[in-house]
Image (tube, grey):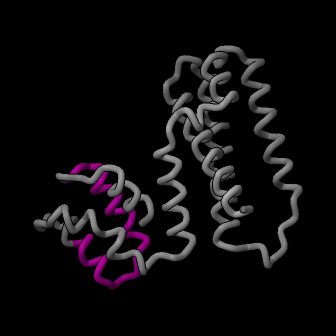
Amino acid sequence: MEALFRWIRRHQPQESSPEFLQLLEQTLESLPPAGPFRSEICRILQGHDFHWERVCNWPEIYRNQRSELDLLLEELYLQAAELPPSLWQNVRFRRFVRCRANPAALDRIQADIETAWEEYMQRPLAPTEVTAESVAGHRLLVEGLAAWMEGLELARLDPLSDEAVERAAQGSRLLFTLQSFSRQLSA
């Protein structure tokens, strides 16, 4: 459901697209067997006419069916997607773009990422500290580091890969968003 809502907010669609229909099918699989949202999706997938204005309002209409964690993640992913490059294109990212054909440079970046993960894993978390915020932070960290690792692997296979740069960029966006979110929680 969250992927569909993020797509709707980013694209403000005016007509049906294969990506939209695929997201509808994926969302349908995660919904309870009955309900108004499921009915709306089924009507669209069956080819009935629909109004894009209503579809664009789905995130607000069906907001109450989503958990606090879902809402928080939606907000954080949206922040990450809208970050200006000047914020997320940090030293590591610029080094990656500049040196992605250099295996030693990629190894250093990977070592930094692995060190960050190991340090994170050594911090104990008490049961009372498991909140929507801590779970969202964990998710951003895991996804950000995984995106970086994918970017590194793709660069090793093809140093000119645009996908490698995009994965590293996504990792940087998520990790910068996590840092900002952590600072907000600490303030």
In this rendered view, identify the residue nearer to me: 30 or 98: 98
User: Farthest bottom residue?
Assistant: 34
In this rendered view, identify the residue nearer to me: 139 or 74: 74
Q: Where is residue 14 in the image (x, y as percent from the top left)?
A: 18, 52
Say whether residue 151 is magenta: no
Quarter of the picture containing the N terminus is: bottom left
Q: Is residue 45 above or below residue 7?
A: below
Q: Is residue 158 above or below residue 172?
A: above
Query: Which segment is the magenta one?
Result: 16-42
Say whether residue 41 is magenta: yes
User: Farthest front residue?
Assistant: 187
Q: Which residue is drawn at 49% across and 61% down?
A: 74
Q: Which residue is drawn at 32% across and 84% down?
A: 35
Q: Which residue is drawn at 72% across and 24% down?
A: 106
Q: Where is residue 161 in the image (x, y as percent from the top left)?
A: 52, 22
Q: Residue at x 51, y 52 (%)?
A: 79
Asked which quadrant contains residue 99, the reply is: top right
In this rendered view, identify the residue nearer to me: 78 or 160: 78
